[in-house]
Amino acid sequence: MDHRPLNLPDALLAALRQARRAVVLTGAGISAESGVPTFRDAQTGLWASFKPEELATPDAFRRNPKLVWEWYAWRRQRVGSVAPNPGHAALVEIEHRVPEFTLVTQNVDGLHKRAGSRRVIELHGNISRTKCFKEDVLVGQWNETGEVPPRCPRCGSWLRPDVVWFGETLPPEAFAAAEQATADCDLFLCVGTSAVVYPAAGLPFTALRAGATVVEVNPEATPLTAHATHALRGPSAQVLPALVRAAWGPIPSSPARGTHS
Ligand code: BV8
């Protein structure tokens, strides 16, 4: 039975089946169907009057550390109450099928690892980790004195989420690993990102320069769409499972996966 509801060209399916080194770049869109609002989505409740890029900066934290800390606490609670979706699961399946696979995410929600993805590069950090604002080192425990944000047990400075804020550089080793994998890849999937935040948004173009097949999955057009080898218009929790089924047949429900083809 033909599982291809979407128009999935044979050339695309062949590129998936023949891929030896794949890189996937994800953005907030892949977590949307899990119930995590994207950066584009209007914020709700307390945060309705704030644009994310206004809160996700060192200046915003210096101006009002309590406000920014509580925004991340709210996001942590949201992320803690949702689960990965079939889009995340399909990427785990692709990781099992392609010999070399690297998942590069802009998301700080940790849902890829919760879905079972193994080779994940978190370019912008992870909100489940905390670090010292002054010393920039991870902090696992601190005294809950009720002060918001809590203080670093070593230097007494504020604590902050271990994420990359606008105007801050990405962790050099993480970005170098993402760039290296992208320069060597033969297949690059770009899923659920508006492709406007740099340097992450430059990666699909590095893949194009490397001669890779570049596939965009997004219900909307982005600055990448016109350059992509294939642009699949639709929500990732539907498109990615359909893509995997069309390329490799029904997804095995149990972990009894096929070995690398
Ligand atoms: C830096 C962590 C050195 C925190 C984030 C070059 C040109 C212009 C500007 C710059 C440049 N270089 C640097 C800059 C400045 C800046 C930047 O890019 N600004 C943008 C706004 C123009 N970059 C930086 O500051 C970076 N640092 O470069 O340092 C430097 C510094 C200063 C000046 C020069 C150099 C740091 C960037 C990282 C910031 N931290 N996150 C946190 O999460 O709180 S960025 C954050 O926003 C996300 O991580 C992500 O990267 C970005 C949001 O983008 P998306 O994830 O794509 O989400 P978005 O909501 O935008 O779009 C969702 C998409 O999903 C949409 O397309 C939608 O259609 C789609 N979608 C919706 N539903 C679905 C779906 N897709 C599939 N399925 C669905 N169901």
Image (tube, grey):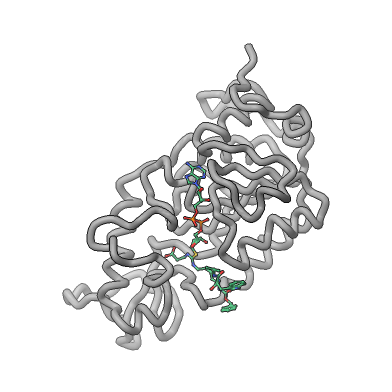
Residue at the top extreme of this rendering = 1
Q: At 42% across and 80% down in the image, what residue appears?
A: 58
* Vertical placement of residue 126 versus 229, above or below: below
How many numbered markers are drawn?
Answer: 0
Residue 181 or residue 34, whichever sits in front: 34
In percent of the image, x 77 and y 36: which residue is there?
15
Is 87 situated above or below 71? above
The extreme bottom residue here reads 155
Answer with the quarter of the image where residue 184 lies: bottom right
Q: Position of residue 48 (x, y in %)?
A: 28, 61
Say whether residue 78 is left or right of residue 30.
left
**Which image quarter holds the C terminus?**
top right
Q: Which quadrant: the N terminus?
A: top right
Q: Quadrant of residue 178?
A: bottom right
Residue drawn at x 39%, y 72% as measured from the top left: 54
Is residue 194 toward the left or the right of residue 47 in the image?
A: right
Residue plotted at (33% across, 57% down): 43
Instruction: Give the quadrant of residue 131.
Output: bottom left
Q: Please provide percent x and percent y for residue 23.
A: 68, 49
Q: Position of residue 41 (x, y in %)?
A: 39, 53
Q: Nearer the viewer, residue 75 or 96?
A: 75
| As drawn, 86 above or below 137 | above
**Place of residue 87 in the rendered image (x, y in percent of width and height, measured from the top left):** 51, 38
Left or right: where does residue 5 sit relative to residue 28? right
